[in-house]
Image (cartoon, helix red, strand yellow):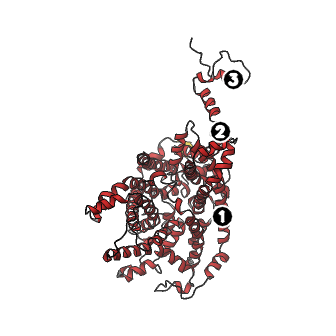
């Protein structure tokens, strides 16, 4: 590993490194800290000429009011529902497909793989128009169905690529042994391979969940009823009001960020996969 | 004697009509028998793959075809129940190409994308080089640096809107502390000069961690011996960067540059929440421009044509990506 070790006595270099590290740390963490701080502050401590980084008096009032005075709880439930269903559906389809692409050679395989790679580059605004027309004709607008159908457009390709990668890493001999022992191909898949890939499946699932949890454009376009809003749309709707309740808005944003934060820490080591493919091998 | 081409006859043989010439399946010509043969041979593979491919066909492939079809139509949502849609050939495209707003939007988009990519790659590379140094605390930093990337796009946009706030925003306060007295109550998002840059900063802030982490992985795969040899030969830090590090990272940098280009070309959420295309249309990137035509002006045909043009642009970038990607795989 090409970690570069520093010579101990090189003080000026160490000084500049720490200066740079401090700047990077500040840039990366400070905005989040500011969000947390605002969410824990009373409004009278927020709108002052000299901003206070540490709240003079900590309060959870903003969180309480965000839940009580707005539909935040509703938005969270909606987001949870949509993201979970989309994740489950994508995982089932993508696990099967990932295994198929990893283990079998069939006509059209390369072309499909390439296509699936390429559709990850697709701007959502391109397919949102035809999807909108379809949803409108099916009277599926203003229902969560519209989201459940459109979210796989981005969760499915990513999951397939990620899972194919995970299956590729499991030696074929395992199935061959299972088949010699009398397992059929599907049985070998379910009993031997699937349990081994569970970490990979979890990681892909988390990715799909975060993608669906964060999605904004489809949700904003397809859904107009406030009770059906997902988190991002609900948060953005705060701006429609006369005065922006920044404290509550920051409290809600903290809530919105938390699941992403927790999940990302869990799948940190799979970070670059599925997106850069094998490019990080070096 | 050459075999007669059975074509459809054989297929109907399944229905009970006897086949005239006995042939083995392998000798058949034409796509249909070949198709059934392949289906039979690979039925297990298809069983695994087909559900997902069917879904992709339904939610991606079909819309892609539909958007091209709609782009050749007059499809005005308010009239669609009374008049329906009519085929008008390339009229939508001609109209778009004659529209100065489109050209302005395209220019803004290209500028925005280029600025985001350059700043993201440079800052990502700088942070990766920093994280590759083994100073006490570098582990903490390498986790902390992920924070901007972890935040949902809408959450970070809202957060930055608060940071940019003209009256109580922390940014103006910090700037006045640093001596920029003119920045008291400057409305970053309300001025045509600064709004685009304000969004560029947010996008770069959100995407540099990914680039940094990916590049760090690349950096750590460079063999130690190279650096040791270079040190013995008396190479300066700059020379090591120039002759070892950068050449090693070249391909990875290529891949990451293209990926960033595509991501930044697609940006929508941050722009929507922060500026919504304003002020005075100065941040009307193509994504917002297209969305407005579809869902604010309800001109679905025209919007579809815009979407197709965007698709073409992305395709060009993607082809480039595949070229780099393939070179990497070899």
Please tell me the numbered disc located at residue B44.
2
Under tag 1, what secondary structure?
helix
What is the chain letter for disc 3? Answer: B
Residue A21 in the figure: left or right of residue A177: left
Which residue is tagged 1?
A: A80
What is the chain letter for disc 1? Answer: A
- Residue A128 x/y as whole percent: 56, 53
- The quadrant of the picture occupied by the C terminus of chain A is bottom left
- Do marks 2 and 1 share a subunit? no
Residue projecting furthest to the top: B1
User: What residue do we see at 56% from left, 59% from top?
Assistant: A217
Say whether disc 2 or disc 3 marks the residue closer to the N-terminus. Answer: 3
- Do marks 2 and 3 share a subunit? yes
Under tag 2, what secondary structure?
helix
- Residue B258 x/y as whole percent: 42, 53
Instruction: Tell me whether the residue at label 2 lies in contact with that at label 3, contact meaning CB atoms closer than 8 angstroms.
Output: no
- Residue A152 x/y as whole percent: 60, 53
Which residue is tagged 3?
A: B12
Place residue B285 in its image quadrant: bottom left
Q: Nearer the viewer, residue B287 or A55?
A: A55
Q: Residues within 10 Å of mark 2 (few under 14, many from 20)?
A: some
Residue projecting furthest to the left: B234
Q: Is residue A128 visible?
A: no
What is the chain letter for disc 2? Answer: B
Q: Residues within 10 Å of mark 1 (few under 14, many from 20)?
A: some
Q: Nearer the viewer, residue B115 or A69?
A: B115
């Amino acid at each position: 590993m090409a970690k570069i070790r520093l010579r101990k006595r090189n003080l000026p270099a160490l000084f500049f490194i720490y200066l740079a590290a401090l700047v990077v740390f500040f840039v990366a963490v400070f905005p989040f800290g500011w969000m947390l701080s605002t969410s824990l502050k009373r409004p009278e401590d927020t709108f002052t000429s000299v901003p206070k980084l540490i709240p003079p008096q900590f309060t959870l009032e903003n969180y309480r009011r965000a839940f009580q005075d707005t539909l935040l709880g509703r938005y969270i439930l909606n987001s949870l529902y949509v993201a979970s269903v989309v994740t489950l559906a994508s995982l089932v389809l993508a696990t099967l497909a990932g295994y198929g692409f990893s283990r079998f050679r069939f006509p059209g395989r390369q072309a499909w793989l390439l296509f699936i790679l390429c559709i990850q580059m697709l701007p959502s605004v391109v397919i949102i128009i035809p999807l909108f027309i379809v949803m409108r004709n099916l009277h599926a607008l203003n229902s969560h169905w519209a989201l459940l159908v459109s979210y796989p457009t981005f969760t499915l390709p990513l999951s397939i690529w990620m899972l194919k990668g995970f299956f590729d890493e499991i030696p074929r001999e395992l199935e061959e042994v299972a088949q010699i022992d009398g397992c059929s191909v599907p049985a070998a898949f379910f009993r031997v391979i699937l349990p081994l890939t569970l970490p990979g499946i979890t990681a892909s699932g988390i990715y799909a969940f975060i993608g669906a949890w964060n999605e904004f454009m489809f949700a904003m376009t397809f859904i107009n009823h406030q009770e059906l809003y997902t988190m991002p749309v609900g948060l953005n709707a705060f701006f429609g009001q006369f005065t922006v309740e920044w404290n509550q808005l920051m409290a809600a944003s903290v809530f919105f960020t938390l699941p992403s934060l927790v999940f990302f820490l869990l799948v940190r080591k799979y970070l670059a996969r599925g997106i850069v493919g094998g490019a990080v091998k070096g | 004697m050459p075999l007669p081409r059975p074509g459809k006859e054989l297929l109907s043989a399944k229905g009970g009509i006897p086949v005239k010439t006995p042939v083995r399946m392998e000798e058949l010509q034409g796509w249909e028998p070949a198709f059934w043969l392949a289906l039979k041979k690979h039925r297990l593979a298809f069983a695994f793959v087909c559900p997902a491919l069917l879904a992709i066909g339904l939610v991606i492939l079909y819309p892609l075809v539909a958007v091209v079809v709609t782009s050749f139509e007059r499809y005005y949502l308010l009239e669609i129940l009374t008049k329906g849609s009519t085929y008008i050939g390339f009229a939508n495209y001609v109209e778009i190409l004659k529209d100065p707003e489109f050209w302005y939007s395209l220019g803004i988009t290209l500028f925005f994308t280029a600025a985001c990519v350059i700043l993201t790659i440079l800052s990502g590379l700088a942070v990766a080089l920093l994280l590759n140094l083994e100073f006490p605390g570098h582990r903490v930093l390498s986790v902390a640096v992920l924070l901007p990337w972890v935040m949902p796009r809408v959450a970070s946009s809202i957060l930055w809107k608060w940071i940019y706030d003209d009256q109580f925003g922390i940014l103006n306060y910090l700037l006045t502390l640093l001596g920029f007295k003119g920045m008291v109550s400057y409305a970053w998002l309300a001025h045509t000069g600064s709004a685009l840059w304000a969004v560029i900063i947010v996008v770069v802030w959100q995407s540099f961690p990914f680039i940094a982490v990916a590049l760090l992985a690349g950096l750590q795969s460079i063999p130690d011996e190279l650096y040791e040899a270079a040190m013995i030969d008396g190479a300066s830090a700059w020379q090591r960067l120039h002759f070892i590090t950068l050449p090693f990272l070249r391909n990875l940098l290529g891949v990451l540059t293209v990926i960033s280009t595509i991501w930044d070309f697609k940006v929508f959420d941050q722009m929507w929440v922060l500026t919504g295309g304003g002020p005075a249309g100065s941040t009307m990137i193509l994504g917002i421009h297209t969305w407005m035509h579809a869902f604010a002006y309800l001109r679905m045909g025209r919007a579809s044509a815009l979407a197709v043009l965007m698709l073409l642009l992305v395709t060009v970038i993607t082809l480039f990506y595949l070229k780099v990607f393939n070179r990497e795989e070899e």
